[in-house]
Amino acid sequence: MGTIAVRIYERVKRGTRWSIVPVQVPRLKKDGTLFLRDDRQGRYRISWYEKRKKQWQTVESRVSENELPYLSDAIKLADDKAWFLNNRHRNVTDPTEETVSRRKLADEIAAYLDAKSGCKKTVSAHRLALTEFQTWATQSKKGLAIRYVDEITKPLLKKFFEHLVDGDEDEGGCGNTPFTAAHKVMKVNAFYRAVFHLDPGKGVVTKKDYKRELKNNRVPEVYSKQDMDRMFAVMDEDEHLTFSTLHEAGLRKRELIHLEDNDLVIDQLVPGCFKCEIRVQSKPHWKFQTKTGSSRNVLVSKDLMDRLQRRKAICRPSKLLFGASTGKPDYHFLDKLKAIAKRVGLDPTTVWLHKWRATAATNWLRSKELGGKGWDIGFVRQQLGHEDLKSIEYYIAIVRNEELALREHALRFQQNPSEPRLWEVPGSGRQTGVANSRTP
């Protein structure tokens, strides 16, 4: 069966007689909408042939019953009706006759991306994933041609994943790795969740469905004490406080960006003994939600808390502790870090914000003999905000490798006492290295 066409007609008065005349649709914008100058009111109807009989449907005004509909209303109605007539074999409902309007995919994606907050790279990644999905899912090939958000299903996202990795028959694949494709699928799921106001972890798919693909096998890297000392030595006061907080509290980038005055918690347990914590929680007014959707308190030193309290006392345009001069969240910390690296002669490509978090986690797990905190694994998981212990295994491996290196050196020293200790610089009498390092 061929494609059913839906045309627009207008009832116009010529002299004393009313006539039904076809409407020539003006040139549309790239997004398929009508230019404002061409959108006019009129008595519009749409028409199509069904079983060789011409069918009619009146276009209703989107404003009120007392006003005439616009040409854009007629175009939308004709578009929706044509979609339904050509997809009835999929048992879809007619959107032009529903009492409750459905959420149109194109409109909701545009609104979601306009409201999306975060750094440019994050917004760009979501835009790319949703644009690819919309282009693929709205085409008529292989019976897709979805038009509404509620048509996104788990099997559909599975097909999208396969398309990203392998491509379609007779077509070249998109060339995405399973890791990248799974992240794009999860971004589509995040869009679905936002449209229907679902809780974190909900939607048509979950991370468990792509557990294997989402697993990142990259071993985390940490900053050496020497590199940290060099960077901290050239930082100004604001930079020093920013990256001290990032490192000591092991925060994610967006958690740091959205820290506010009331997130500083200080409690005097006994005279002279204080429990200092940073509360990490979602900020709906900044459209920020923690990665797991839950809150946590991170233990920090009294010295860092005093510095943060002094920052809190300074008059600022908003309650954000590390906000921009406009009072809005500052998304330029990575640029600042790369500039600091250049000042000390480090390769800017070897520094990134999450590396501070990995360094903090490693230091928390590192034994006190190696200059760390010596915290147990469960407490470190709680401080990092991880839902399980799987992500901490990489940090444990780093610490154990350090311990094995120290034991191996100790064994060599026992066998050859004349060999310099790992923490002694030959000929200087000065101690340095892992075994005598201070907590960063």
Image: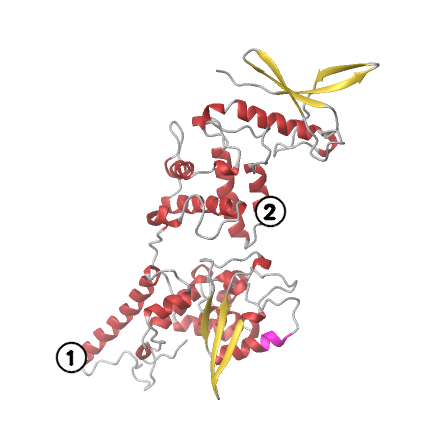
Tag 2's secondary structure? helix
Tag 1's secondary structure? helix
- Residue 252 at x, y percent in the picture: 47, 62
Judged left or right of residue 286, residue 17 is: right
Q: Is residue 185 shown above or below 42?
A: below
Give the residue displayed 63% in from the left and 75% down from the top: 314
- Residue 371 at x, y percent in the picture: 35, 78
Most common SS among magenta residues: helix
**Is label 2 or label 1 in front?**
2
Give the residue displayed 34% in from the left and 59% down from the top: 219
217 or 114, nearer to the observer: 114
Which one is earlier in the sequence, the residue at label 2 or at label 1? 2
- Residue 71 at x, y percent in the picture: 70, 28
Segment tinted magenta in the rendering:
310-314
Asked if one can make out residue 225 in the rendered structure from this viewpoint, the answer is yes
Three-letter code for the amino acid on which mark 2 is drawn: Asp
The span from disc 2 to disc 1 (Cα, nearest Å) is 67 Å
Q: Is residue 108 shown above or below 419?
A: above
396 or 204, nearer to the observer: 204
Residue 415: mark: 1
State how many labels appear.
2
Q: Check if mark 2's residue and mark 1's residue have beta carbons within 8 Å.
A: no
**Occupied quadrant, residue 43:** top right
